[in-house]
Image (cartoon, rainbow, N blue to C red):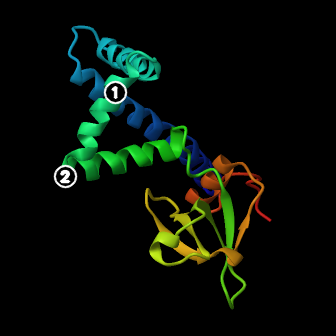
Amino acid sequence: MRLILRYLVRGLVVVIPAAITVWVLYQVFTFIDRLVVFPYPGVGFAATLLGVILIGFLASNFLTRKLFEWTEKLFVRAPIAKIIYSAIKDLIEAFVGEKRRFDRPVIVTLEDSGMKLLGFETRDDVSFLGLPDHVAVYLPQSYNFAGNVFLVPATRVSPVEVDPTKAMTFIVSGGVSGGDARHQ
């Protein structure tokens, strides 16, 4: 019975992540496919993908870049749209844009306990908040799409020589993934 239980647990470890990944990808694929209705499955997804690539090309092109800059100015000037547009744009650019923000992994040392927190320095100057000797450090939460921004004295922050993707994987997985996953 113990052997069967062990096989069941191993099977779950293999099946559950694969099944959830396939399900999420299927949901995204069918959602996008339903936005652009074509009689054949996948054509809407392909058309959307090609459209996004074309927009990326046009936004990078010298002649059409001004049109996209003008459109962005409209979003940034509208009171409510500015908040939504700016927040989403900054978030996307933080991960995949030219202005990546999660590319400086750091260790924050807590004052008396000696505990250390792993995060990302997102801003090295927060003097506009009246804290000239502080930096902004983002601490993602494990198994969550959330986190907190802490304003930390710069003297308590040390850069970490690690690939930012590995650091993010390590944090988000609760220390289980990223780097050497063996138990010590």
In whole angstroms, how far apart are the C-alphas of marks 2 and 1?
19 Å
| Residue furthest bottom in the image | 112
- The local secondary structure at tag 1 comes to helix
Secondary structure under the numbered disc 2 in the rendered image: helix
Q: Residues within 10 Å of mark 1 (few under 14, many from 20)?
A: some
Where residue 14 appears, as percent x and y from the top left, is 57, 42
Q: Quadrant of residue 74?
A: top left
The percent coordinates of residue 102 (x first, y second) are: 58, 52
* Image side of residue 95 versus residue 163, left or right: left
Q: Name the residue carrying label 1.
A: 68
Q: Quadrant of the N terminus?
A: bottom right
Using the image, determine if residue 79 lies above or below residue 50.
below
Q: Nearer the viewer, residue 4 or 116?
A: 116
Front-lying residue, 90 or 138? 90
Mark 2 surroundings within 10 Å by alpha-carbon count, few (fewer than 14), some (14 through 19), many (20 or more): few
Q: Which residue is mark 2?
A: 79
Q: Residue at (69%, 81%) from the top-left corner?
A: 115
Can residue 16 be seen here? no
The answer to whether residue 81 is above or below residue 112 is above
Q: Residue furthest top?
A: 39
- Residue 106 in which image quadrant: bottom right
Q: What amino acid type should be assigned to the residue bearing mark 2?
A: Pro
| Residue occupying the point 65% across, 62% down | 175
Spot occupied by residue 182 in the image (x, y as percentages of width and height): 77, 56
